[in-house]
Amino acid sequence: MQNKKWITFTYYSPQIRRITNLFKNTNTHIVFRTTNTIQQQLNTGKANLTNHYGIYKLQCMTCNKVYIGQMGKSISTRYKEHIKYVKYNNPQSAYAMHILNNRHEFVPETEILKLLKHCTKGSKMNVWENLFIQEHHIRGTLILEQQVGKYNPLYSLANLTKLTPCSTLAESDRQGEDRL
């Protein structure tokens, strides 16, 4: 009796079963793998330092609340855009509105700006941004001007970060550094 061979197919849609049925009467076992697990969707691999995409945190020096955003350009360029919105009283930036509405000070980027997660643009970036927004919202450290979507319980199930109010901001900072 011959040993059976194993073939792995990536499961994209139910039509893949039609293809695998061709192997039904052969000496081959078929196994499937998916591309849409939470870990696969959130895992971006090692950071590519040539691109500047990622999730960042701006911290208000007056009240210590944070703004979470995403960028597809250099981090200093993105910060300059926020400051421009403050100077021209432009409501495009929730961070600028926080500074203006509360008459808080803004300081150089080196003191308040931090890259939380280096990742590529697209749906993965949106998921990471939402995860960090939810994390800071639950802790009560998110600025009020930032919109928070519906809570997604999958973030806590993904076990990528602890979404509990008792986690400290310093823990989050260390976790963010570990993810880079």
Image (tube, grey):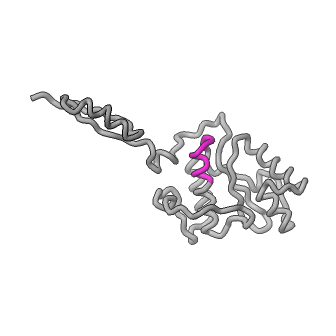
Where is residue 6 shown, x and y percent of the image?
25, 33
* Screen quadrant of the N terminus: top left
Residue 180 to residue 65: above or below? above
Q: Nearer the viewer, residue 113 or 54?
A: 54
Residue extending furthest toward the left:
1
Q: Residue at x 77, y 58 (%)?
A: 95
Q: Residue at x 77, y 59 (%)?
A: 94
Residue 132 to residue 78: above or below? below
Where is residue 45 shown, x and y percent of the image?
52, 40
- Please identify the quarter of the rendering in which residue 52 is found: top right
Where is residue 49 shown, x and y percent of the image?
64, 37
Residue 121: say if magenta: yes
Magenta-tinted stretch = 119-129
- Please identify the quarter of the rendering in which residue 137 is found: bottom right
Residue 28 vs residue 140: left or right? left
Where is residue 39 shown, x and y percent of the image?
46, 49
Residue 97 in sight here? yes
Residue 177 to residue 145: above or below? above
Residue extending furthest toward the right:
88
Q: Main secondary structure of the magenta part?
A: helix
Residue 14 vs residue 133: left or right? left
Count of numbered circles on the image? 0
